[in-house]
């Protein structure tokens, strides 16, 4: 056997030089549309999430105003309901419609991606013949004990046993392996590659069972690769808190809610060292959907940003443990199984963890519910006056061809800011309100490793990385269920998560930052991400225990250019989600709130509004 002298990632998977593999085009749009038995998106690596091609037609419509898609094939398909968007909200809308009107009603779900679930994305990595499952977006059923009975009944009906997570999630895993919160300072920004066993923020606290930092504030400040002046400033911040504010007690809450966190750092604590301010800016991540320079003191305190004591992420009755091995993709799969029973075998969500999903079943003509992937909706229009029309025509693009179907009603469960571009005749006030609904970009990169000995050696449960694209690197949630076993020893293959909340120009308005970060995110190629991950892991982990060329088996970069919903100003959210004739609006954007329970509740509202 010849020695491998070069290694290549083909679409994110390690391949030996000289190996053959079908070009991506050969298994591209045509095969996706046909959904043959070999079609299985969760096993795809490389650029995932909103993968290349998934938003091309949408961007042509929204950015360039394209309206001519060539000849349109008017299909003889008529549905009681068409759902635009196959994420959790769209799938739930189909479920609620069946519950209300009967399982014989004809429903079509259209989605522009090559997989269902929206942000609830399943990632599978095959490492030395072992399959490890992870999530590429929506992680968790957050605070299920606070869920509305509508959501709890849905979860029960699709076979999600919330009590099962109490044993499925191994709360003792991190303690057994002495894994906690650390910070990695990279050479490019901080002058040296160094890991300090202190997170300098509360972010790692959301990983249930994770150990805190090993060092005192004094030791943590001293070990940070900063100048002596910077170390002194960092210690002042770590020892800071609201007691440093000279504000009357009765005025404190109003003050911290209206004054800037960065003003507090710079004016009250007299911090001007770039390294300390950078650590502070990156200490909130996806808890705040942006850099902390845009937060009030109260907001920074609530997410445990640099300088504030750790805070409980959720109350003691709602530990952060309700993760399937593939995150909320487990919920999406259970919903699809409920809607299209022949797609897989298994009578509950746990049994579906390792079940084989036959994607060829999704769009069969015999199904009451059909799920059509790789299909971008570009126009939704009533058949007459929206006030009394009984039909809606939906145009979509699949394989660069234009098609039209007819529906008795439509639920828009897509990005709400896209709706004004595709719903014809929408009242201008409503269209304007929808355009104000923003989403922050977010990136979840999953990396398949042959072992995690280097993570164990450095005690890394979560590594905050304020100098890198991915500001946090963490071991995946330790969940075993449905016959799937989480990695047990450092010698075993595993998946690590790398989280990036990209920011734009410092202190620019949030919308401007989101647009800049979104543009940068989408302009990068897979090779750019691979090199960034190589530098990050290679600089952080000890060379005697980690060799990128040997130990990294696969990479999935889940890019969500439109990630967490942040809502719009004033009453714009309520105005934007109003029914429009036989068209109603779902998705968590219309709440606004970025979690699975909210997405489902918005679906329930939208279905009820259809009547």
Image (cartoon, rainbow, N blue to C red):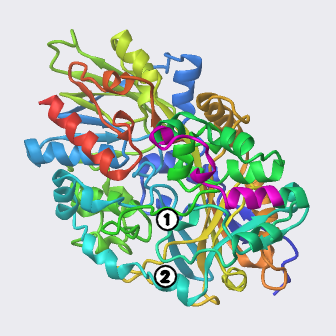
Asked if residue 587 lies in the magenta stretch, the reply is no
Residue behind mark 1:
206
Q: Nearer the viewer, residue 313 or 521?
A: 313
- Residue 527: image location, x then y, percent: 77, 54
Q: Is residue 291 visible?
A: no
Residue sitting at 54 percent across and 86 percent down? Answer: 175
**How far is disc 2 from disc 1 in space, using C-alphas?**
19 Å
Residue behind mark 2:
486
Which SS class for mark 2? loop
Name which of mark 2 and mark 1 comes first in the sequence: 1
- Residue 343: image location, x then y, percent: 29, 62
* Position of 442 relative to 197 (above/below): above
- Residue 490: image location, x then y, percent: 63, 88
Q: Quadrant of the C terminus?
A: top left
Q: Is residue 249 visible?
A: yes
Which residues are the magenta region? 232-252
Task: Tell me the quarter of the picture where residue 128 sits.
Answer: bottom right
């Amino acid at each position: 056997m010849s020695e491998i002298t070069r290694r290549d990632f083909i679409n994110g998977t390690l391949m030996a030089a000289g190996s053959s593999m079908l070009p991506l085009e050969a298994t591209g749009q045509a095969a996706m549309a046909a959904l043959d038995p070999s079609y299985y998106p969760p096993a795809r690596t490389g650029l995932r999430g909103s993968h290349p091609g998934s938003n091309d037609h949408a961007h042509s419509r929204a950015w360039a105003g394209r309206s001519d898609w060539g000849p349109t094939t008017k299909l003889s398909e008529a549905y009681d309901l068409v759902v635009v968007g196959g994420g959790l909200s769209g799938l739930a809308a189909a479920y609620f419609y069946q519950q209300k009107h009967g399982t014989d009603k004809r429903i079509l779900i259209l989605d522009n991606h090559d997989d269902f679930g929206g942000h609830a994305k399943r990632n599978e990595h095959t490492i030395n013949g072992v399959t490890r499952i992870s999530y590429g977006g929506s992680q968790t059923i957050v605070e299920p004990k606070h869920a509305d009975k509508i959501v709890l009944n849905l979860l029960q009906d699709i076979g999600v046993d919330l009590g099962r997570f109490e044993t499925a999630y191994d709360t003792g895993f991190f303690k057994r392996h002495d894994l906690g919160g650390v910070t990695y300072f990279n050479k490019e920004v901080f002058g040296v590659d160094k890991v300090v066993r202190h997170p300098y923020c509360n972010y790692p606290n959301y990983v249930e069972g994770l150990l805190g930092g090993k060092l005192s504030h004094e030791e943590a400040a001293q070990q940070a690769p900063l100048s002596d002046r910077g170390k002194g400033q960092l210690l002042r911040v770590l020892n800071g808190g609201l007691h440093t504010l000279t504000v009357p007690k009765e005025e404190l809450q109003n003050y911290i809610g209206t004054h800037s966190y960065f003003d507090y750092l710079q004016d009250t604590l007299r911090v001007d060292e770039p390294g300390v301010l950078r650590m502070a800016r990156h200490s909130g991540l996806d808890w705040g959907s942006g850099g902390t320079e845009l937060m009030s003191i109260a907001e920074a305190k609530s997410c445990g940003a640099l300088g504030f004591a750790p805070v409980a992420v959720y109350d003691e009755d709602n530990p952060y443990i309700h993760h399937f091995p593939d995150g909320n993709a487990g919920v999406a799969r259970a919903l699809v199984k409920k809607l299209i029973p022949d797609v897989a075998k298994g009578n509950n969500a746990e049994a579906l963890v390792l079940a084989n999903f036959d994607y060829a079943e999704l769009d069969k003509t015999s199904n009451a519910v059909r799920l059509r992937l790789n299909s971008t909706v570009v126009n939704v229009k009533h058949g007459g006056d929206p006030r009394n029309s009984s039909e809606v025509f939906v145009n979509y693009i699949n394989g660069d061809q234009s098609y039209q179907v007819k529906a008795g009603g439509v639920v828009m469960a897509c990005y709400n800011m896209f709706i004004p571009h595709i719903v014809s005749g929408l009242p201008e006030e409503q269209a304007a309100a929808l355009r104000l609904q923003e989403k922050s970009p977010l990136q979840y990169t999953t990396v398949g490793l042959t072992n995690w000995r280097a993570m164990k050696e450095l005690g890394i449960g979560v590594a905050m990385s304020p100098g890198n694209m991915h500001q946090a690197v963490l071991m995946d949630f330790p969940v075993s269920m449905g016959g799937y076993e989480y990695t047990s020893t450092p010698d075993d293959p595993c998946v690590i998560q790398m989280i990036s909340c990209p920011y734009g120009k410092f202190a620019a308005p949030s919308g401007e930052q989101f647009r800049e970060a979104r543009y940068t995110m989408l302009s990068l190629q897979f090779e750019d991400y691979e090199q960034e991950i190589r530098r990050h892991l290679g600089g952080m982990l000890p060379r005697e225990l980690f060799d990128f060329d040997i130990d990294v088996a696969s990479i999935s970069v889940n890019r969500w250019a439109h990630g967490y919903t942040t809502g719009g100003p004033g009453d714009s959210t309520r105005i934007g989600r109003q029914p429009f004739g036989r068209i109603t609006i779902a998705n968590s954007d219309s709440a606004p709130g970025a979690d699975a329970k909210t997405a489902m509740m918005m679906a329930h509202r939208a279905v009820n509004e259809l009547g």
